[in-house]
Amino acid sequence: MAPTFKNPELVQSKPFINGEWFESKSSKTFSVYDPATGEKIAELPDMTPEEIDYAIEVTEDAFRKFKHTSPYERSKWSRNLYDLIIENLEDLAKIITWENGKCLTDARGEIKYAASYFEWFAEEAKRLYGHTIQPSNPNNKVITYKQPVGVVGLLCPFNFPTAMGARKAAPAFAAGCTAILKPDAQTPLSSLALAYLADKAGFPKGVFNVVLVSAESTPMCGLKFCESKKIKKISFTGSTPVGKLLMKQSSSTLKKLSMELGGNAPIIIFDDAKLDIAVEQSIASKFRSLGQTCVCANRIYVQSGVYEEFCKKFAEKVNQFKIGNGFEEGVTHACLINERSITKVEDHLQDAIDKGAHVLVKGGRLPELGPLFYAPSVVKDVTQDMRVINEETFGPLAAIVKFDTKEEVLHWCNDTPYGLASYVFSESLNNIWYMSEYLESGMVSVNTGIFTDAAMPFGGVKESGFGREGSLYGMDDYTVLKSITLGNVYHYDEK
C-alpha cells in the first residue's frame, strides 16, 4: 500500500530533462518495487542511447550560461533547495522508505543529511578562492583562480538514494557546473523528487537533469557518460570493480574522476575504551541500514582484556533489535534491498562457521515478514582467513576478532586493498594517535560510530577510491585551476 504524501507531485516516474518531465519514446520500461512488500511502486521508461545523448547535450548547453552566473545567485538557489528539502522532509523520507526499505527514522536522518550539503555549499559557493603569487621574475605576477570543470555525470547507488545525489550535486552547482544524474534502477524516485525541488528552487533549466535506465541498460548509460567528450567529470559511488571499469572507459577522454568505492572498515576497541560507548557505537556503525553502507564496520577487533565482556554486551544489544516494515512505529531495522544481499550474508556466515567461528546471535531469514527481511547475525572468534574479513559483506553480519597488541591489529587492519573508514575506541592518546596516523584509510573516527557530516572531507585511499566530498575541499573536484601570468608589470627600482 502506497504511503500518503502531503505533496504528491514529489512522486514522479519520468526523466527530468531541461526543466521538464521528459516523454521517452523507448519501447522498454522497468519497474520499481517496495522491497518490504514486493509490491510494484512505479513503472519507468528505460531510456534509449539516443535519449541519453540528448540529455547530455542539454546539460552541456545549460553549462554555457550557468558557468557565468554569480556565485551569489548559485548560493541563493542552493539555499532555496535546502529550505525546500527541509519543508518536504516527511514526504521525501517516505519515498526513501518506500523504494529503499530502510526504516523511516533512518530515512528522515538521510534527508536532513542530504539537505545539509546544499546548506553548506550555499555558503561555500562564495568562497572559491585563488592566490596571488610572486614568481622569480620581479616584473611578473601570477594570479590563480578556479573555474568550473564543466558538465558532470553523477552515478549514484541505492543505499542513500537522496543523500548521494545531494552530496555530489551541491558542490557541482556551487562551483558553476551543470549535472546529469543516473540513479540506481532500484531507487530512482528519490532523485526525481530532488530534481523537482531543484527546479522549484530556481535553478535554470538544464542545470540538473535525471536520466532513467534499467539495471540491464546501466552499462550502456555508464559507457555513454564515460566516453562523452561533453562530460568533463564523473562522480561515482559504488563497488570497486565497477569503479575500475568506469576509469578504463573514461581513459579515452581523460576526464576528471571522483570515486567513492568499497569499504571493509575495521573497528578497533582497546582494553582502556569506555566499553558501553564502544558497544553502542559499534552497533550504530555496523547495523546502520542493516550494514548496507560503505563506511559500516565490517571487522570488529577487540583487545583480549575486554573481549569476552564486549561480545556479551554486543550480543545483548543486537537481540533487542525490532525488525519490521520501515513504516511501522518502533521498528529499529527494516529489510534488505534485494535477494543478492541476503545470499552474500548467508555465504559469509556459513564460511565463518565452517572455519571455526562461534555464533553469538543466530540471525536469518524472517519469511513471516517478507522475503527480504533478515535478522542480524553475530559471530566471535573470527580469523583473518575468513571471507567476512577479506570481503565487504554489506549486510547484517558482525564479525568479532580478538587481538593482543596494537602492532598486531594495525597489520590486520591494513592487510586489505581497501581504505575508506576506520574506527578507534580508546582513552589513551598514544593509542588514538598511533592508530589514526598509521591506519591506511581516508577517514578515522575516534570514539564514535557515526561521523559523516557536510563539514568534513569524505573519501578513501587505496582501492576505496579518490576525491573528497563535503567540506572546504568539496568543490576542488568540480573545478580546474587556471593560472594567469601578468608580464612586464612595473617594478619599483630606487635607481
Image (cartoon, rainbow, N blue to C red):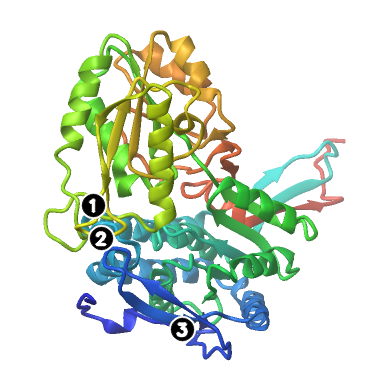
Could you say where residue 483 lies in the image, as x and y percent from the top left? 75, 51
Q: Residue at x 49, y 47 (%)?
A: 472
User: Alpha-carbon neighbours of circle 1 within 10 Å: few (<14), some, or many (≥20)?
Assistant: some
The Cα–Cα distance between marks 3 and 2, rounded to whole angstroms, is 29 Å
Mark 1 or 3 closer to N-term?
3
User: Alpha-carbon neighbours of circle 3 within 10 Å: few (<14), some, or many (≥20)?
Assistant: many
Q: Residue at x 80, y 59 (%)?
A: 252
Res 370 label: 2
Label 3 secondary element: loop
Query: Closer to the camera: disc 1 or disc 3?
Result: 1
Residue 440 visible within the image: yes
**Is the C-beta separation of discs 1 and 3 under 8 Å?**
no
Residue 145 visible within the image: no
Could you say where residue 255 lies in the image, as x and y percent from the top left? 72, 58
Q: Which corner quadrant holds the N terminus?
A: bottom left
Q: Residue at x 82, y 46 (%)?
A: 140
Report the amino acid beneath label 1. Leu
120 lies left or right of 90: right
* Nearer to the camera, 44 or 384: 384
* Nearer to the camera, 384 or 444: 384
190 lies left or right of 364: right
**Is the C-beta separation of discs 1 and 2 under 8 Å?**
yes
User: Alpha-carbon neighbours of circle 2 within 10 Å: few (<14), some, or many (≥20)?
Assistant: some
Report the amino acid beneath label 2. Gly
Q: Which corner quadrant of the image does residue 369 belong to? A: bottom left
Mark 3 or 2 closer to N-term?
3
Res 366 label: 1
Residue assigned mark 3:
14
Label 1 secondary element: loop
